Amino acid sequence: MKNLGIKISIYLNYFVFAILLNSVGIVIAKSINVYGVSESQASVLEAFKDLPIAIVSFFIASFLPRFGYKKAMLTALAIVFFGCLVMIFGNSFVYTKVLFLSIGVSFALIKLSVYSLIGLVTETKEEHSSLMSSIEGFFMVGIALAYILFPFFYSDDPNSWLNVYYVLCFLILISFLFLFFSKVEYQVEKSGNSLQEDIKASAKLIIVPLVLVFIISAFLFVMIEQGIMTWLPRFNEKIFFFSEKLSVQMAIIFALSLALGRFVAGYLTKRISWVILVVICIVISGAILLFVLPQLKESTDLVEITAIGDVPILGFILPLIGLFIAPIYPLLNSTVLSSLPKRLHSAMSGLIIIFSALGGTIGSRVVGELFETVGGANAFYFLLIPMILLIIFVLLIDRMSKKKTVVA
């Protein structure tokens, strides 16, 4: 089957990095409980993950087609393999920073390659949107596995959880070997420019009004998503008073909701305008926060909950917000990428990744600071601000796209 090797490699690599990248919330909770750091100190792990993604994406987006997408993905897998080994034998908060630094650098290479390859193996906007949504959905399945995999290694021994990284090293090795022996074929549209000219042309993308609105929208969305995903395990532990293990396990509902939402989005976008779908999803997400948060209060008098049967109904409702924020990101990305010439997909992917990384860092940092100062229940109210702004920018995108803005 044509392009089968590329597609399998994309799915496999994205699955592995889903586990690694989004374990940050789990590791933050572990850092607080095992290494004795505060919420605000632990929140810097998001920056160690996201800022390298932004920096690496900025410098290599235009160069990547010349280097080769397969080589880039193999390099990424090698870097993160050694990052996991460092975490196992380092076993301190300092080495959690090294781990997420390696994950950030590697994911920049993986995501740039994946987003660019999607444009090369699809022919129509509908096919592009469908593949993008299904890949992002599969990414969410990887996140869900993280919430199962990490608690499996929890025990009374405070260091036992590090054994999960042996399993992750094995998965990385399998992914590396499969990609190494896969035949990856594609053709990149030649620009005929020098590398310096390509970088200048890519930088000009950011001043195109439609592109600028898109990347701001991506920034706002990731601020929302990472604000919830990163802090949900800690939120469960501190607000609902779940045990450490149950706090992580309950977060799987959020990840599975994201996965289901993105798979369903691939189906719904063929029948509903993407703008209408996104606006409805944002409104429902905000309504869930406004319904759940006023009913929550932090207390030290609660009895720790260790069994899923004792979880209150609000503990199940809050993570379902993932079902409604799920379709937003792949639809935004697919819309802008499928509107550009394929030779600009790598550069545009770089911009998307940079602003997404900044959104994730800022969102997680702000929620972490608020968690420490005003409490977890009140901290999540902050997410209503980017939700409102995102609706405004999505409507702007719809209005501008109808004018058929063309990128030269």
Image (cartoon, rainbow, N blue to C red):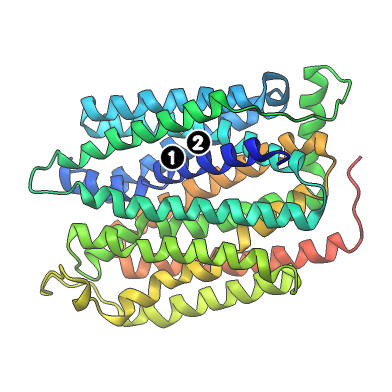
Residue 80 x, y percent position in the rendering: 42, 28
Where 239 falls versus 363 (above or below)? below
Residue 72 x, y percent position in the rendering: 59, 25
Q: Quadrant of residue 255?
A: bottom left
Q: Quadrant of the C terminus?
A: top right
For this rendering, which residue is in front, 100 or 380?
A: 100
Q: Can you tell which mark lies on residue 47?
A: 1
Residue 73 x, y percent position in the rendering: 56, 28
Name the residue tied to disc 2: 51
The amino acid type found where label 2 is placed reads Leu
Q: Quadrant of residue 83?
A: top left
Where 192 falls versus 369 (above or below)? above
Q: Farthest residue toward the left?
A: 156
**Residues at discs 2 and 1 in contact (Cβ within 8 Å):** yes
For this rendering, which residue is in front, 390 or 66?
A: 66
Where 221 falls versus 48 (above or below)? below
